[in-house]
Image (tube, rainbow, N blue to C red):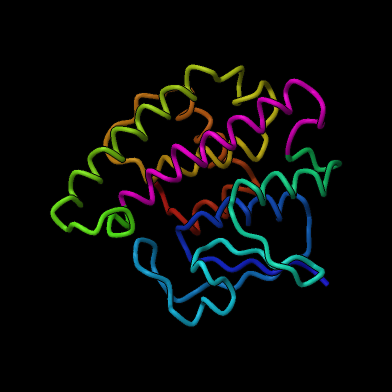
Amino acid sequence: MGYTLHNRPGSGGFVVEAALTLADAPFTLVELESRAGTPLPESFRGTNPWGQVPTLILPDGSTMTETSAILVYLALCFPDKHLGPRPGTPMHGAFLRWIAFANVNLYEAVLRRAYPFRFTDDPAGHDALRSAATRRMGEAMALIDANVAGAYLLGDEMTVADIYIAMFLPWLPGNVEAARVVRIAEAVRRHPVVGPIWRRHFGGR
């Protein structure tokens, strides 16, 4: 039995789909009839009570959520596919650091921009929340950019951390002051395996 990935086009499951494909893992993609930035169907709570994508059903039937955790898990499950650095090395420490950093600081900001009603009960505060989230995304991306260690985030080899961080660029409004991350995203878009998945989710962005 393979994996089952629940997602919708243009959402964070893009990077999980890319990781599964790079790992040559057998999986079924279930795409919800819903567009990013809108609430998921209530019926989906039967699959994930928190109502979020991506949701990954593992081969044993158990459910896994949280994009960053899924990426670390898959990198450990398929060590020969080099989705991430070897555990126990300093590079693996950096890999965990930046995936966690992106999850807390980039993904959370995306959610505040798209779903401000989740974070305040005062509709008058929605615009301020979006503005602060946009600023925070820019600051976080600038810090990541300053720590790029080579052609890719951790050096000369692409990992799922690069794909994950590149994913946020289409969601960041305006010009991005992060030239190294932009260069990495261009490499991700050109990748023979990941590129077609990117274009299906984000088009030419």
Q: Is residue 105 left or right of residue 49?
A: left
In terms of depth relative to the viewer, which is nearer, 105 or 192? 105
Q: Main secondary structure of the magenta part?
A: helix
- Seen in the picture, residue 53 relative to 191 is either above or below; the reply is below
Give x and y (percent) for residue 81: 81, 43
Residue under the point 35% across and 61% down: 37
Residue under the point 45% across and 76% down: 33
Does the stretch in magenta take in 98?
yes
Residue under the point 19% across and 43% down: 128
Give the quadrant of residue 132.
top left
Q: Is residue 76 left or right of residue 204?
A: right
Give x and y (percent) for residue 21: 70, 55
Give x and y (percent) for residue 182: 45, 30
Give the quadrant of residue 55.
bottom right
- Residue at the bottom extreme? 43
- Residue at the front extreme? 121
Residue under the point 49% across and 44% down: 167
Q: How many marks?
A: 0
- Seen in the picture, residue 15 relative to 134 is either above or below; the reply is below
> Magenta part of the protein: which range?
84-113
In terms of depth relative to the viewer, which is nearer, 56 or 21? 56
Q: Is residue 149 left or right of residue 42?
A: right
In terms of depth relative to the viewer, which is nearer, 85 or 10? 85
In terms of depth relative to the viewer, which is nearer, 176 or 64? 64
- Where is the N terminus found, in terms of image quarters? bottom right
